[in-house]
Image (cartoon, helix red, strand yellow):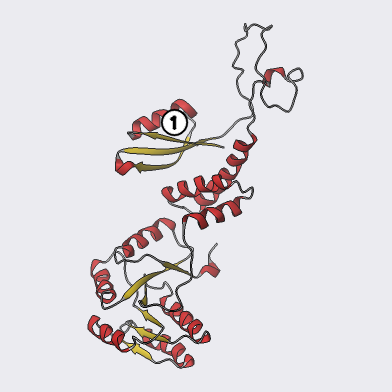
Amino acid sequence: MRLKTFYAKTMTEAMQQVRDTLGDEAVIIATRDENGGKSVRVTAAIEQTDSLPDPYPSDYETSRKRPNFEVKSTPASNEKNSWHQYDEEEEFEGQITDQLTDIMLRHVVPNDVMDNLLATAAMTGIPNAEDALAAAIDHLYNFAPLPTSSRKAIMLVGAPGAGKTLMIAKLATQAVMNDINVAVITTDTVRAGGVEQLQAFTKILKIPLQKAKTREELNSLLNQVQGHDLILIDTAGTNPHDPDDMARVARLADAGSIEPVLAMTAGVDAEESGEIARSFALLGVRRMICTRMDIAR
């Protein structure tokens, strides 16, 4: 498969470039607005064939020497194809791109993300597709553990069932095992079993579980636990498409010096995950924890 990217002022012009260059059999892989919507970028692909037309007409001067490029056979043994130019590096990059495109299309990776990953993976020069993808992801995204001590409280937010409560318990356990003075607060006081689930863990860790129903109560508790190295806050599941629900968690995040961190379930639809992340980004979320990685492909 041969991939090529086209830039134009309008989608119509870009599509015409695709047809002129790759033909009517080309398949559109991705489209994206550029320069604030002033131009477009289209990535298209076409299956490569082994046989290519002879660019020389039948009445071409046979005595005239044709150009010789990098070929495995000699011009004498394969004169008809001696004009072919073999670019091993381009062919190698094309193979990596094909493999990664198949992988990301299977996982329904958003077009803009796929474009960035493909371009970065191609530049790494790594011969293995999985390693090239890992290097591209590592280059484009910052992966770092949450701080073991912070002047800001860590508040986990996310959709219902994202695993926030269990992640709070894991972070608290890690802190206790490393002799870090940690405080745990829950605002998930409405859901049946919300408090009891987290309390079962904090009881084992011998940490008092603080409870806050409102922004004012949360602010008061934050003032009480200021001396702790790490403050963890659990929240109820939030519907990212419900303005009232988002406003509720926004008020809690504004109760003091708090960093909201998104808990996101791995292995779900990529487009939907992107929409959820963009919704929570409006609350000031800049970091994300992936949960249930053990059951994701």
Label 1 Cα neighbours within 10 Å, binned few <14 / some 14-19 / many ≥20? many
Frontmost residue, 266 versus 97: 97
In the rendering, at what x and y percent does residue 40 appear?
A: 36, 38
Q: Residue at x 67, y 11 (%)?
A: 65
Residue 63 vertical position relative to residue 196 in the rendered view, above or below = above
In the rendering, at what x and y percent does residue 282 appear?
A: 29, 63
Q: Residue at x 30, y 76 (%)?
A: 257
Q: Horizontally, is 104 left or right of 158 in the view?
A: right
Give the residue type at disc 1.
Val
Can residue 193 be seen here? The reply is no
Q: Quadrant of the N terminus?
A: top right
Q: Horizontally, is 273 left or right of 48 in the view?
A: left
Tell me the quarter of the picture where residue 83 sits: top right
Residue 51 vertical position relative to residue 88 in the rendered view, above or below = above
Q: Horizontally, is 4 left or right of 234 in the view?
A: right
The residue labelled by disc 1 is 18
Q: Residue at x 62, y 9 (%)?
A: 58
Frontmost residue, 257 versus 199: 257
Tell me the quarter of the picture where residue 217 sits: bottom left
Can residue 238 be seen here? The reply is yes
Q: Quadrant of the C terminus?
A: bottom right
In the rendering, at what x and y percent does residue 52 appear?
A: 61, 24
